[in-house]
């Protein structure tokens, strides 16, 4: 045994001097090089011994093959119908190297990770987690691809790092467990791109969006932790402007540290909403999570959430006077509509008329929900109503003008939302033709 290890080490040193191209020429991928290094680390180059022959299960001879238990027949390709596909082989060549051709199982000496159909030490993400995430279940997915039935995955099987050796190898070679490492990308295939373990502590927002009325003064976001930990872990919370801007609309956060104790699975954090008296549209901004330690913390799919601030201010519209008077031959009467309060947006109010002793169209031209638009900086608006001239001697007549709103969330009516308009008679009779 000793002389074989010495020979192998000398063999590696000799070819390392020749450079990496030797490994590229003699091994199909970096995975096989990693497998070789691990074999050296854990002492798997041992004196060959006869392998025990095991009679394969009947399912092994079917087109569909066996499930992970090695006994149940799959219903279709890729182990369709099996409970869960926990792992797939990322070290194909090393598996065949260690494979006992007389059986369909790997030698148990190398089957350290509990997957009977793989000899490798590192596994890819199982397809069930991908399928589960596509269904977007209310409480999310368990690490093994099952649908979580309770909040925070309380009903999920305990999540543990079952590939510790692979984690150590990747960490030693790549300098850390980061998404930039080819090993980690191949290892997790997107499920936990910033962890070495099959299962990790993952931080997410409980919801993809939150809404709050401006005068509430704050919005509470819920950050959840999936997975267990024996230590305190930190995640960072930041905000980004959208249509809402800091510090006018809210108080920004930049890498604010949120600490989860070992037994904490969720954390409520308040973000300050700044109150103003300005009428505006609903506005939004984003909150984002980032991590401080890629070796211990991963981010879930909901690592960004949108926060909408609902407008709760109103501008009040009124007539400037309760009554207006005009001589008939003037041809029009001008009413003044005023706006109380400030706004960052254009607002509309509707103007209508109702007959009194004056009738439309004989005495004036009626209006029905005519839109009057106030720009953001306008506080008053003059509107003309047409008075129709005739040659008939008559008493003074009147009609009413009324205001109504188009958006109760942004517009209110003042006390003077109705005004009376009096048309003064300016016609005279011809008394010279009067016969006594």
Image: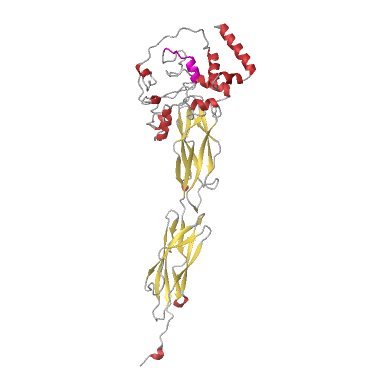
- Image location of residue 219, percent across then percent down: 47, 42
Q: Quadrant of residue 107?
A: top left
Q: Which residue lies at the image location 54% right of the left edge and 40% below the top edge? A: 253
Q: Check the picture and name the quadrant holding the N terminus.
A: top right
State the residue at coordinates (60%, 18%). Answer: 22
- Can residue 189 be seen at all in this image of the molecule? yes
Residue 157 shows up from this direction = no
Q: Residue 435: give x, y in percent of width and height.
A: 36, 92
Closest to the observer, 182 or 350: 182
On whether residue 224 falls in the magenta region, the answer is no
Residue 433, located in which quarter of the rendered image? bottom left
Is 413 or 300 nearer to us in this picture?
300
Q: How many marks?
A: 0
Q: Position of residue 297 (x, y in %)?
A: 51, 29
Looking at the image, residue 10 lies above or below residue 334: above
User: What sort of colour scheme is used for the picture?
Assistant: secondary structure
Give whichever of 358, 106 is nearer the camera. Answer: 106
The answer to whether residue 262 is above or below residue 313 is: above
Q: Which residues are magenta?
A: 91-102
**342 or 47: nearer the eye?**
47
Percent position (x, y) of residue 379?
Answer: 51, 61
Quarter holding the C terminus is: bottom left
The verdict on residue 99 being magenta is yes
Residue extending furthest toward the right: 17
């Amino acid at each position: 045994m000793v002389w074989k290890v010495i020979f192998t080490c000398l063999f590696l040193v000799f070819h390392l001097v020749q450079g990496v191209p030797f490994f590229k020429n003699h091994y199909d991928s970096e995975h096989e090089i990693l497998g070789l290094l691990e074999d050296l680390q854990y002492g798997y180059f041992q004196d060959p011994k006869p392998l025990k022959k095991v009679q394969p299960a009947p399912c092994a001879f079917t087109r569909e093959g066996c499930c992970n238990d090695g006994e149940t027949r799959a219903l279709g390709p890729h182990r369709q119908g099996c409970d869960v596909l926990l792992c797939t082989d990322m070290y194909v060549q090393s598996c065949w190297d260690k494979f006992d051709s007389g059986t369909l199982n790997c030698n148990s000496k190398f089957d350290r990770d509990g997957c009977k159909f793989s000899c490798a030490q590192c596994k890819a993400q199982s397809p069930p987690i991908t399928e589960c995430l596509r269904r977007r279940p209310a409480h999310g997915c368990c690490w093994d691809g099952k649908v979580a039935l309770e909040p925070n995955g309380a009903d999920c099987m305990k999540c543990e790092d079952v590939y510790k050796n692979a984690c150590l190898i990747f960490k030693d070679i790549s300098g850390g467990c980061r998404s930039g490492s080819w090993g980690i990308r191949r290892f997790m295939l997107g499920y936990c791109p910033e962890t070495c373990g099959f299962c990790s502590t993952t931080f997410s927002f409980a919801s993809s969006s939150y809404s709050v009325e401006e005068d509430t003064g704050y919005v509470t976001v819920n950050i959840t932790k999936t997975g267990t930990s024996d230590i305190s872990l930190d995640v960072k919370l930041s905000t980004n402007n959208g249509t809402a801007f800091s510090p006018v609309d809210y108080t920004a956060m930049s890498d604010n540290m949120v600490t989860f104790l070992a037994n904490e699975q969720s954390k409520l954090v308040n973000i300050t909403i700044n109150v103003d008296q300005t009428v505006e549209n609903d506005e939004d901004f984003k909150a984002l999570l980032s991590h401080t330690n890629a070796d211990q913390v991963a981010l879930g799919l909901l690592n960004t959430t949108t926060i909408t601030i609902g407008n709760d201010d109103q501008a009040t519209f009124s007539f400037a006077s309760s009554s207006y008077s005009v001589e008939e031959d003037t041809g029009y009467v001008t009413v003044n509509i005023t706006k109380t309060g400030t706004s960052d947006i254009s607002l509309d109010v509707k103007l209508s008329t109702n007959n009194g002793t004056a009738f439309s169209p004989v005495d004036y031209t009626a209006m029905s929900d005519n839109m009057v638009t106030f720009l953001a900086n306008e506080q008053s608006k003059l509107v003309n109503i047409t008075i129709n001239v005739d040659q008939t001697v008559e008493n003074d007549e009147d009609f009413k003008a009324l205001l109504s709103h188009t958006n109760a969330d942004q517009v209110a009516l003042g006390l003077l939302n109705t005004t009376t308009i009096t048309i003064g008679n300016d016609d005279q009779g011809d008394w010279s033709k009067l016969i006594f």
